[in-house]
Amino acid sequence: MHRRIFLATAAAGFPAILTAAKTKPLPIGVSTLGCPKWDWKTILKNVSASGYTGLELRGILDQMDLTKVPELSGTQLAGSLKDLKALNITVTDLGASARMHEPDPKKLAAHMDEAKRFIDLAHAMNVPYVRVFPDQLVKGEEQSVTIKRMVRNLATLGEYAKPAKVTVIVESHGEFTNKDLLTPLMTAHKNVAFLWDTHHTIVAGENAETTWKTLGKYTRHVHLKDSIPQGADPHNRRYVLTGTGKIPVKETVRMLARNGYKGTYCFEWEKRWHAEIEDPEVAFPHYAKVLREYLTAS
């Protein structure tokens, strides 16, 4: 079944890929979170074949620390950059796992060290953004105290990233999925901005237009995905192919385009965390085809 879907989707999308190749490429990207079994060469081959122009790096095979990926280290890095250039693929951002809320000094030091190493790698690769998580409100601690800690940590990273010409982007993630919690973090430093995971804010009950009105001016990168609810808990979701679920992906994309969003429309397919969802051989070309339709109709 997967093979039949893949072939049908690829065939349907092929004319559009040819058309896009003759005009300005559309800013459609994909995260490596969705292909945890693909090595570097396979990622590049399949991402290019589906017509993507952007690639978000969030782990390669079993290695989540990008600074330890052989193809992104030492003498291999130059060759990997040539591979990307040859295929006209731009690395949009590097996804770190660093969490800004961490109250334990030793644990926080490790998170900050990871973020700084990712910033160094982004500088070496000429990548504009490094993603970090706000993540959680600390139990037993005043909310304002937690947010002040996050702002301090983000300010430190923003200042560190300044000479590297890298911007730290904070994702709507964990308990930080509404504009009221996220907005104070945007004031940390001029090199701190927003990665809007539209799925997370919508599932949390915030209308996309509402999020954009407050955070649009800070938004540099966008994650998109679709899902359906499972059971009574609205937060218990199953990810499904784009356009087949209950998330207003089409409306969100058209709203972003209408309001002048200039970043990448990135497919964050969480295959690494949810093995049961469709394989990337199916999901990746499907998303590229659907997003191309949404954007050309905007």
Image (cartoon, rainbow, N blue to C red):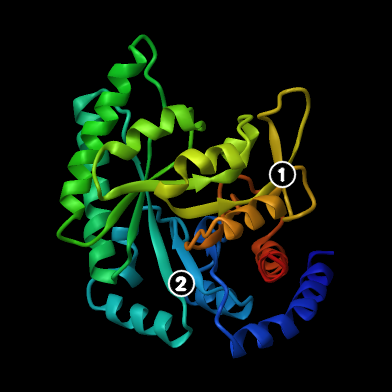
Spatial separation of the CA atoms under disc 2 and disc 1: 31 Å
**Circle on res. 247:** 1
Q: Which residue is mark 2?
A: 40
**Horizontal placement of 131 versus 110: left or right?**
right
Q: Position of residue 27 (x, y in %)?
A: 54, 69
10 Å crowding of disc 2: few (<14), some (14-19), many (20+): some
Q: Is residue 111 visible?
A: yes
Q: Position of residue 54 (x, y in %)?
A: 49, 69
Give left or right: position of 285 versus 28.
Answer: right
The answer to which image quadrant residue 4 occupies is bottom right
Camera sees residue 277: no
Residue 256 image position (x, y, % from top left): 58, 55
Rendered residue at 32%/25% (across/down): 147
Front in this rendered view, residue 194 or 113? 194
Look at label 1 and name its amino acid. Answer: Ile
Using the image as rendered, state which of residue 113 and residue 254 is in the foreground.
Answer: 254
Residue type, mark 2 in image:
Trp
Q: Earlier in the sequence, mark 2 or mark 1?
A: 2
